[in-house]
Amino acid sequence: MVIVLKKDISSEEKAGIKRMLAARSFKLNEIRGEESTIIAAVGKLAMDIREVEVMQGVAKVIPISKPYKMASREFKPDNTIVEVPNGRGQIVRVGGRRLVSIAGPCAVESRQQMMDAAQAVSKSGAVMLRGGAYKPRTSPYSFQGLGEEGLKYLKEAGEKFGLPVVTEIVASEFIPVMKDYVDVYQVGARNMQNFELLKRLGALGKPVILKRGLSATIEEWLMSAEYLLSSGTNDVILCERGIRTYEKATRNTLDLSAIPVLREMTHLPIIVDPSHALGVRDKIPPMALAAVAAGADGIIVEVHCHPEEAKSDAAQALYPEQFDKIMRDIESLAPVIGKQVAHIMTENAQSPLTSGIRIESGRIKVERPASRPKCVFCGEKGAYAESAVEKFFCSSADAEHVHSFDEIFQSVVDGKARFGMVPIENSTAGSVYNNYDNLARFEDVSIVGAITLRIEHSLLAPKGATLETIRTVYSHPQALAQSSDFLKAHKWNQIDTVSTASGAKLVAEKGSVENAAVANARNADIYDLEIISQGIENDPNNYTRFVVIEANHVGSGTRSDDIISGKANMATFMFSTKNEAGALYDALGIFKKHGLSLNRLESRPIAGKPWQYWFYGDAAISEEIEEPEKYVSDVMEKLKTVAADVRLLGVYRENK
Ligand code: PEP
Ligand code: MN
């Protein structure tokens, strides 16, 4: 049932309602809206809804209309994101804006076969490893799987490549032997309605991939998910793997229309297994892409390094090259549908978490390494961004350069560096759009700090150069724009470089007195150049604001308090609005209502959705607010009720 609370309900009344329902074993989900707060309650006991209706503070009670309750969107309007930790302290997330690929052989056959498969699929971008150790075969004479030995090979291979493992459970009696090896249980199509298995499995609380039965309707499938959810796990991933129809050209018929249908019915993530649906390897790649295009959260496919030797499902096993091509295609498709492909952190990466991740009283805890973290910036040594790293971290992090803004984000997501220094806005040239778009694209990244740097440009050139010898100036386009008054006075060619420092480096390499660079004066020392003119920027009040990013591999909570300290005074929100009159006004009203001053509002087109926009809002949080994170999370709840989509990019300290 859905219990709509009165607006003026007291906290004691609300607690009383929750207590009463919990005492009767109801599972509760509180959803706070702008107009009203509701409690979704699902229980095994039949209860007369009038008993709740008469309680103080209750406005009305509506029964959940669907037979599946906890799986329904009525119970939980927001998409569920299933989190699966890997051995590298990273969390693989299924759902939301991420695309995941799970790959591996149908069955575990040998240690070597699993190692080879894991290496191949991880290289191409799989984030989980599959392999059956107990195989439900049509014939009792076919290979039945290696059992526990197979589980060992699967786990060992998964650990080596940082891949959580997925394997099928065929009966609940295998739980004791499987539980130490398995990250995600798979319930196969043939067991979808094995309710006793579902109940026992749900009670373990581990993530489960629930495949659709060979002849199950979508509703029957959700009823099976309900068994898992009502038994104790929140983490169910639905997997469409083809249903039996009269068509014989493929092994089964892949029902991709189930995806948009399910999206409306349920909050659970949905993945697609084109391997078992098609049954023939050459027909799998187009359907894997179609699944992603249709809105699936990921794919699960069978890959074997020597398919001709596979002991089961040989005809549908993809060659590693075929899987690699699928992954490259998915990378290109992802931005078109506004999604981002999930990756595993590279081995030996300088992860913030490599020293260990533990679960302590139900919360994920992270142990920090003793070594100094890295902060990557774009450009060569001497870039303004490098000064920003030095100024922000005051030698508690090492600055290291990469070659593009995208690489900053990718390095942080892959764990190659813990932090990234990202220019976001310049006071004269405006927004760095590329980085606003990266914040949208890289969903597992948060803003954990910000710093504003005064930008003072100099004209640098090799020894012997004068204003008269110079013909060409090299620099980042923003630096050229910011020095346009000075440059206009001289009729020089202007050539763009990726950063100001790379312009200085190039000029030094060329060594000609005809070339000069617009850059930070510190580059004169680094590249042995002369300062021809200093302070050439149009406006001496020229500032660049940088944000510091970190990957949120670990669930919620502040991540950087070991390095970055100070009470948060800024929050950055990202939201899109419904296409209706006053939608933006309503969203902005939430900031006003909560006394958050919006310092800046930027908008960017949403990738793949023409004429729809992300709004980025930087809000200042008053020092009087005692718990900024909690305050902001309340604002988020309110914003969710009026916006089409909302993301909190970070609650952080900015030293002004
Ligand atoms: C499998 O994944 O290997 C499998 C047996 O799948 P399904 O249950 O979908 O047939
Ligand atoms: Mn199979």
Image: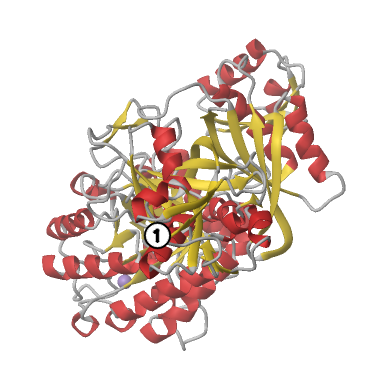
Q: Where, by quadrant of the figure, is residue 78 drawn?
A: top right
* Residue 72 seen in this snapshot: no
Q: Is residue 124 above or below residue 253?
A: above
Residue 291: percent from left, percent from top: 52, 70
Residue 298: percent from left, percent from top: 46, 62
Residue 259: percent from left, percent from top: 57, 64
Q: Is residue 491 above or below residue 52?
A: below
Q: Is residue 27 left or right of residue 300?
A: right
Seen from the viewer's position, the closer of residues 410 and 4 is 410
Residue found at x 29% / y 53%: 164
Tell me the colour scheme of the image: secondary structure
The residue under label 1 is 463
Amino acid under label 1?
Lys
Q: Is residue 310 left or right of residue 411?
A: left
Residue found at x 52% / y 36%: 450
Q: Residue furthest bottom?
A: 249
* Residue 292 seen in this snapshot: yes
Q: Is residue 258 above or below residue 254?
A: above
